[in-house]
Image (spheres, grey):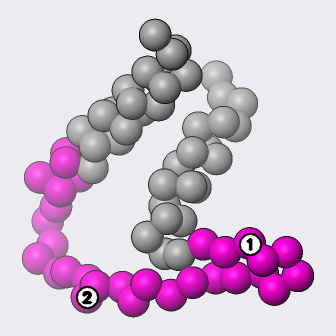
Amino acid sequence: NNIHELNLVNDFISGEKHMNNEILSRTSDETFDAAEDSIYKVEKTGASISIACSVSLLHHYCSRLPHD
């Protein structure tokens, strides 16, 4: 019954559908090698993030921006 979590799940489902559509409509056979899981760390604050987490964090941040 948590509306915030329900919206988050719906956003993930929508994003997954979009990514699957992009994959299906690809015109290139090129692939990327697995990205190394490097960590970006801010020494002053101790904050850190990995490549694996950065995309979902960016998606979450963008979903919070005002939009029409």
Determine the residue positioned at 15% across, 73% down.
28
Determine the residue positioned at 70% across, 82% down.
41
**Residue 17 shown left or right of residue 2 in the figure:** left
What secondary structure characterizes most of the magenta part? Answer: loop
- Of 1 and 30, the residue lying toward us: 1
Residue 32 figure quarter: bottom left
Regarding mark 1 in the picture, which secondary structure is present there? loop
Determine the residue positioned at 71% across, 30% down.
66
- Of 25 and 60, the residue lying toward us: 60
**Residue 29 shown left or right of residue 43 in the figure:** left
- Of 24 and 34, the residue lying toward us: 34
Question: What type is the residue that disc 2 sits on?
Answer: Asp
Determine the residue positioned at 24% across, 39% down.
17
What residue sits right under mark 1 in the picture? Answer: 47
Question: What type is the residue that disc 1 sits on?
Answer: Ala
Q: Does the magenta stretch include residue 33?
A: yes
Disc assigned to residue 35: none
Categorize mark 1 by other alpha carbons within 10 Å: few (<14), some (14-19), many (20+).
Answer: few
Q: In this view, does 56 lie above or below 68?
A: below
Residue 45 is situated, as x and y percent measured from the top left of the image, at 85, 75
**Residue 35 shown left or right of residue 41 in the figure:** left
Regarding mark 2 in the picture, which secondary structure is present there? loop
Q: Give the range drawn in magenta.
A: 20-49
Residue 60 figure quarter: top right
What residue sits right under mark 2 in the picture? Answer: 33
- Of 15 and 27, the residue lying toward us: 15
Q: Quadrant of the C terminus?
A: top right
List the single residue furthest toward the right.
44
Residue 48 figure quarter: bottom right
Q: Is residue 67 above or below residue 20?
A: above
